[in-house]
Image: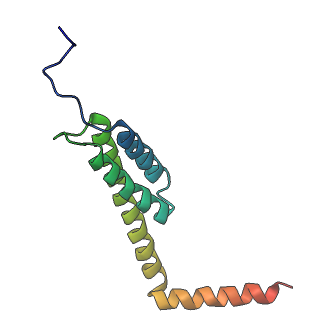
Amino acid sequence: MFGNYNSEPADQRSVPMTTAAVVCSVIAVSTICCVYISFLCGILGIIFALLSKGGETAMSPNARTALTVSVAAIVMTALLLAGSFLTLILQYGSIEAFWDVYMEMVEAYSAAMP
């Protein structure tokens, strides 16, 4: 009589947090070769996806997708980083040997510059 009262409680999920999670997960995947940016955005995507639940017990489908993509981006970035170090060690034998070769190249190029 005095208003339209629903017996269902209002959805307490946060749409802006879900949007932030999706954006961060897309940035994390698209910057996998930039390790720091990808890790940072992946972690932020996970945090925003978890915070988007609000008072609800389940996440929205978009937040679940953002969570999955963020975790996948972090795993792919870690695999790329580990593969890079493994290749470096297999190619040069150790980090110190690589550093020696690198410093020789820097000295050779800096001596050639006027």
Residue toward you, 112 or 54: 54
Q: Is residue 112 left or right of residue 31?
A: right
Question: Is 56 in front, or is 60?
Answer: 56
Q: Residue at x 32, y 39 (%)?
A: 14
50 vs 107: above or below: above
Q: Nearer the viewer, residue 58 or 89?
A: 58
Q: Dividing the picture into quarters, in which one does residue 7 lie?
A: top left
82 displayed left or right of 95: left
Query: Which corner quadrant of the image does residue 56 belong to?
Result: top left
Residue 108: x and y in percent read: 73, 88
Q: Please indicate whether residue 103 sits to the left or right of residue 14 in the image.
A: right
Picture layout, residue 61 above or below residue 23: above
Query: Farthest right residue?
Result: 114
In which quadrant will I find the N terminus?
top left
Determine whether 56 is above or below 51 in the image. Answer: above
Given residues 75 and 102, the one toward you in this image is: 75
Please determine whether, in this image, residue 103 is positioned above or below residue 31: below
Q: How many marks?
A: 0
The structure residue drawn at horizontal position 46% and vertical position 57%, both measured from the top left corner, is: 32
**Residue appearing at x 65%, y 90% in the figure:** 104
Q: Position of residue 110 (x, y in %)?
A: 76, 86
Is residue 33 shown to the viewer in this render? Answer: yes
Where does the image place residue 57, in percent across and percent down from the top left? 16, 41
